[in-house]
Amino acid sequence: MDLNRRQLLWAGGAVGAIALLAACGGGDDAEPTGSATGSAKPRKGGTLRVGALGRAAAITRDPHGSQANESDYLIISLVYDTLTVPGTKPNTEPRLAASWTPSEDLKTWKFKIAQGATFHDGSPVTAKDVVYSLKRLRATPAGASRLPGIQAKNITAEGTDTVVLVSDYANAELPLLTRLTTFVVPDGTTDKDIAKAPGTGPFKLGWFRTGNARLVRNDDWYGGDVYLDAIEVKIFESPQAMANALLAGQIDLASNVGAVAARTAESRKDVQTVRRPNDMAMPIVMRTADGPFADPKVREALRLAVDREAMVKQVLSGYGTIANDILGTGDPAYDKSIPQRARDLAKAKELLKEAKFDTSKTYELLTTEDIAGLAESATLFATQVREAGVKVKVVKQESAVFWDKTWLKGDLYTTYWGTNDSVVFFASKTMVSDSGQNEAGWKSTEFDTAYQKAIGTADAAQRTQLLGQLQQIEYDSSGYLLWGMADGIDLAGAKVRGLPKLPGYGRVQLEGAWLAS
Amino acid sequence: MAGQLTSEPVAPAAAPPAPGKRPARASLLFLARAGSALLKRTALLALLLALVFAAVALLPGDAADATSERGESAADLAARRELLGLNRPVLERFWDWMTGLPTGDLGISARGEKVTDLVSAAFPNTLLLGGVALLLTAVLSLALGCWAALRPSGRLDRAVSGSATAVLALPEFVVAVALVLVLSLWTGWLPAVTLTGADGSPASWDMLVLPALALTIPQVGWNTMIVRAALADETRAPHVETAVLDGLPPHRVLTHHVLPGALPAIAAGLATSTGMLLGGAVVVETIFNYPGIGSVLASAVTDRDSPVIAGVTALSGAVITAVLLLADLVRTVVTGGRR
């Protein structure tokens, strides 16, 4: 989910200031009754006009394709169903799979398909359809990371309503992996027909044209009541244009529009701001394998030198929370008992001295402008650590250069992760020794052992305890400095109710939305 | 030449033959010149397209990187490269793409969509917006330029020239932001952004107003200056002085004697504006969320998507070539084939 540089220019100061002026004018002063995410008795009917970010040239219709556009993902998520969906607690909830049971060794998982689930053309969903869809997903270039540890030959049907997945290793968190991309299409759907393939989701596709779509309610949805008659998805290239459209009343919901837009809309009483916490992590990566930050004392010093509150206040305009260098803040298993690191410049200097860190040199911090606030976070961090005697120069790279040359290789750089993912997810993707995206080149046998133990433990209480140990190791010695978490921010008109509260991809769960009269 | 572009009947053959009064020869001359210009411009466009491919190849990263997801291994990326044909030499890919061009095949985007599908909805939208903006530019700059020219060095002339220079220097995005603020968010008179319906074109005509104005205003500045200068040059021509001495009223001198001679310069100015309008469209379309080719191009560059970039370049190049030929035609007709 990336924005390009021009959009960020847009999200920049001058325009923000102008939009601020704009927000001061117009709008009525009626306080909205109820709230976007509150609970009242839902009313049926109406069309919700939703703006979502996307680029015209990046449009894809394939549910298993490479998703760059939030607008495409939103449309696909409402038309098709995944096996499971993100939840709050637990963080994995049933969808097309009504239930799942693991084997004793946590390698074999059986998913039971929801009763009465049908495709939009009326045909029932069978295990065959699910197996076909999962194999199709597995065969995509990103298949190995989308279904980690599951080989195509180990995806099989058992009867008409059960799908069996066999993992190469014990994995207590396997259902969590099926939350985001396991969209189900009918068995045998060819690439040529994929755009027209019927889904099983809460909405049917009315029309699709150049990234815009009209979706109409699926009255036969197995998953419960859907209130809206229709949802119209409008593609927006820039968050600023999307905010303007909302302020001008051309759309009812601006999905994931960001903090700059929220600031400009603060004075408008007829606009609701929805904050979805733990939406985006923007950690600073310090290389552990070699280079100037290989000594854990140096990394600890930088973690003590950063002023977390100031980062959240200035980089995120206050739309966020401070974090504690552990990734997976939205996970129910996140360990809140680990003490919060606070700024301690004296201790930081002491540690640097002990580590014989060369403070005469200037170190480069590499960053990009992929997402709003990322480059700003680097700049502010550089000013803060200067107070501990560390000289940092921020180098902004063009997105493609950054991903090509810096990511996974640099000594000191910013990264970002924009999903509501779990402690285990981040550990498996970025911190286990052999993970493909080990951003800091971190190899810790202690951590690997704790990880293997945790995902191989069936008992939930015991697993939580093991995950606590895992997080403690991460807190003490990983290559991450996670200073805070950005909120996901949506803006909505006064009448919109029942909006999603979850961060990351949870923002697409509009099946419960409704319009007050 | 006087009367060339008016409805006055052509002078009888008894009159001394003036250049340009031999339509057959003039049109032959024009055709020959248009043909050679077309050939030259086509060759230039082909070279430009080759440069597009080369430039994209020189940029860091490639389409496989740009369209991959985090978590794809080196082997996955290699497979993706193979799939997109990126492992072949750039010259070969360019040749492949070029051979499809005459048949209207613009290749496949990095995300597997047909490039013709990507541009088929967007390009007409941009042409519509650019066409409206060009028409507005022509009418406004002619009106302002003539108005100023009627009272040379008067207060009005100075005011028009001064404001034209000021507006000329304004970037499109400044104009666009000011327009959204005043005409949409503060007053609510016009929609802030363009939304499309099921047919892929703007849902209502009033959505065109702001983006067209944002493109037009800077161009009017530029073209008013050209019109004013061309008229001033032409005013010094002997036949105009004769007309003035004959006591013809100023506006008649302007429309019948000054304007026709100034037309080639004005047409050339407008032709140049076409290129600038297409360039400005990239910025303006983003601000107004206008579903045109500008946003397709910008995101294709991000994706290192050569077939899409080349496709957009080819279409834009064709349009600009056509407009330049039109400007040539105007000059040929007016000057009767004299250079």
Image (cartoon, coloured by chain):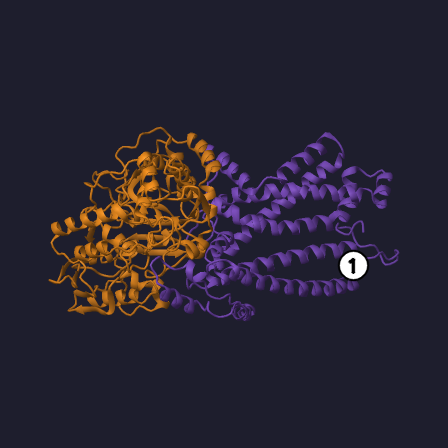
Chain colours: A orange, B purple
Q: Nearer the viewer, residue B176 or B251?
A: B176
Using the image, determine if residue B151 lies above or below residue B319. above
Residue A172 in view of the camera: no
Q: Quadrant of residue B224?
A: top right
Give the amino acid at mark 1. Gly
Q: Which residue is mark 1?
A: B337
Q: Find numbered disc 1 in the image and state the secondary structure of the residue it sits on.
A: loop
Residue in the picture at 23% in, 49% down? A473
The quarter of the displayed image where residue B137 is located: top right
In the image, what residue occupies the spot 64% across and 62% down?
Answer: B44
**In what quadrant of the picture does the C terminus of chain B appear?**
bottom right
Judged left or right of residue A200, residue A362 is right
**Left or right of A320: which side holds B298?**
right
Q: Where does residue A236 sit, x and y in percent of width and height?
A: 42, 48
Q: Does A396 sit left or right of A204 as displayed?
A: right
Question: In the rendered view, would you say B127 is above or below A241?
Answer: below
> Does A278 appear above or below B307?
above
Residue that sits furthest to the top in the current view: A29
Residue A136 point in image, percent of width and height: 30, 67
Q: Residues within 10 Å of mark 1 (few under 14, many from 20)?
A: many
**Whole-percent x, y for residue A454 in the image:** 17, 54
